[in-house]
Amino acid sequence: MTEVRANHRRAEDLPLPGGDFRLLVQKLGYQALIALGIVENPLTRTRQANLGHAQGVIDDLMMLRDKTRGNLSSEEEQHITQVVGDLQQHFVKLTQEKKA
């Protein structure tokens, strides 16, 4: 019986990954995509834009990019620049669609 339990692992028993800059950027980017209504919210199972929240997350990513400039590897710099740029494009498009 104890062997079965030892082999059965639950999600809460596994360590969460951390300490990776690109993973942090991905997590924040995913939050922004949910706030933009592009990705389904996994809790509500809906897509609903909250542009104020999206702008806040994008601003946080821009601040992170600016504060870490010169301390990132070229891959990390490229990654955060790409994520911020993509999110800004989606934000502008949604803002323009709301005005129309």
Image (cartoon, grey):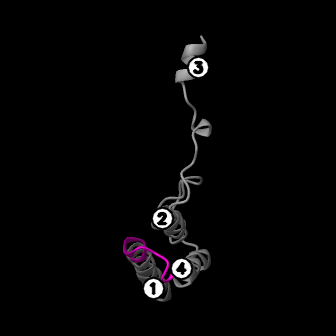
Q: Where residue 69 appears, x then y in whole percent?
A: 49, 83
| Residue that sits furthest to the top in the current view | 1
Q: Which residue is mark 3?
A: 5
User: Disc 1 residue type?
Assistant: Val
Question: What residue is at 58 percent from the left and 75 percent from the top?
Answer: 57
> Nearer the observer, disc 4 or disc 1?
4
Which image quarter holds the N terminus?
top right
Q: Do residues under tags 4 and 1 come within 8 Å of each other at their CB atoms?
A: no
How many numbered discs sit on the rendered protein? Answer: 4
User: Disc 3 residue type?
Assistant: Arg
Q: Which residue is mark 1?
A: 92
The question of residue 20 being in magenta is answered with no
How far, Cα to Cα, is label 4 from label 3?
Answer: 44 Å
> Nearer the observer, disc 4 or disc 3?
4
Q: Determine the secondary structure under disc 2.
A: helix
Q: Do residues under tags 4 and 3 come within 8 Å of each other at their CB atoms?
A: no
Going from the N terminus, do you reach mark 1 or mark 2 first?
2
User: Disc 4 residue type?
Assistant: Thr
Q: Where residue 29 appears, x then y in whole percent?
A: 49, 68
